[in-house]
Amino acid sequence: MARSKVGIIGNSYLINDQYPVHAGGTMNSEAIAEVAGCMPLMIPSDPRFVTVGELLESFDGFLLTGGRPNVHPHEYGEAETEAHGAFDRARDAIALPLIRACVDRGQPFLGICRGFQEVNVAMGGTLHPEIRDLPGRMNHRMPPDGTLEEKFALRHTVRFNPGGVFHRLFGAEEVMTNTLHGQGIKRPGARVVVDGQAPDGTPEAVYIKDAPGFTMSVQWHPEWGAASDPVSRPLFEAFGDAVRAWAAGAAQAGLQRSA
């Protein structure tokens, strides 16, 4: 049987500062194919090429990846500053309405890092441009030097709400995660439940209250070593199960319409 299809929301980049591409980390595709058990397909996240309606009908679920560009602060009613960093306005134009549509339809998505932040903004929340500048907060950014193994190494705990969605999934109230982000949630959006926090209070795990589908999103990068990591694996497995359930429901609905 054909695998259920997961659309990977990528970012716009320039190769050698001149050749434009849409790209996503290989580890995202590995996690979707090898752990979630679905077919990973890159999406050119630009409204010139695709529409939200087409994406909803073409894919069974979506992976909202991390990436260097940040959500533009105009999307949450704030002025752009130097601290907000680089942007990908084309991705904003696709990802934010796509998230809202998935929440309404019950179509599954998994948000990672920037994707986690997109979920909050899509639901009306706001972001801090630089977590490390806040009193009492740690530096959550990627270490500037070292190997990939060193940059993606586990660096702090995340504690979940007792009995919450993430606690039930992982079977633990506290897990170790990596951390490679500069921005973070300032004000949670409507129905955004902060279900896990870093030791300094930074939100690290959220879901959408009363949403009919899978909406779990994390601020860390579970795609790194997803097949062997005891936290990453159950997250991607649960996402894959949700994607297959959606695909089965959509197929059944199609059979009923054609009968």
Image (spheres, rainbow, N blue to C red):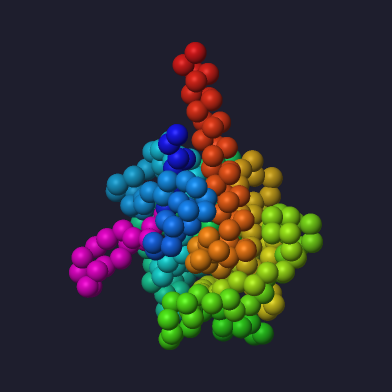
Is residue 35 found left or right of 135 in the rendered image? left
The picture places residue 194, in percent across and down from the top left corner, at 68, 62
Is residue 8 found left or right of 162 in the rendered image? left
Residue at 56% of width from left, 31% of height from top?
A: 249
The picture places residue 61, in percent across and down from the top left corner, at 49, 44
Residue at 44% of width from left, 71% of height from top?
A: 80
Question: Residue farthest to the top?
Answer: 259
Is residue 23 found left or right of 215 in the rendered image? left
Q: Can residue 88 be seen by looking at this rendering?
A: yes
Vertical placement of residue 55 versus 150, above or below: above
Q: Can residue 215 be seen by looking at this rendering?
A: no
Q: Is residue 10 magenta?
A: yes
Vertical placement of residue 79 versus 244, above or below: below
Residue at 41% of width from left, 49% of height from top?
A: 40
Residue placed most toward the observer, 177 or 88 = 177
Q: Is residue 142 magenta?
A: no
The picture places residue 250, in percent across and down from the top left corner, at 51, 30
Magenta residues?
A: 9-24
The picture places residue 128, in percent across and down from the top left corner, at 56, 73
Residue 212 found in image quarter? top right
Residue placed most toward the observer, 227 or 73 = 227
Residue at 26% of width from left, 68% of height from top?
A: 14
Vertical placement of residue 65 versus 2, above or below: below
Question: Residue farthest to the left?
Answer: 18
Name the chief secondary structure element in magenta: strand
In which quadrant of the rendered image does the N terminus lie?
Answer: top left
Residue placed most toward the observer, 20 or 148 = 148
Total numbered labels placed on residues in the image:
0
Residue 200 found in image quarter? bottom right
Residue placed most toward the observer, 239 or 118 = 239
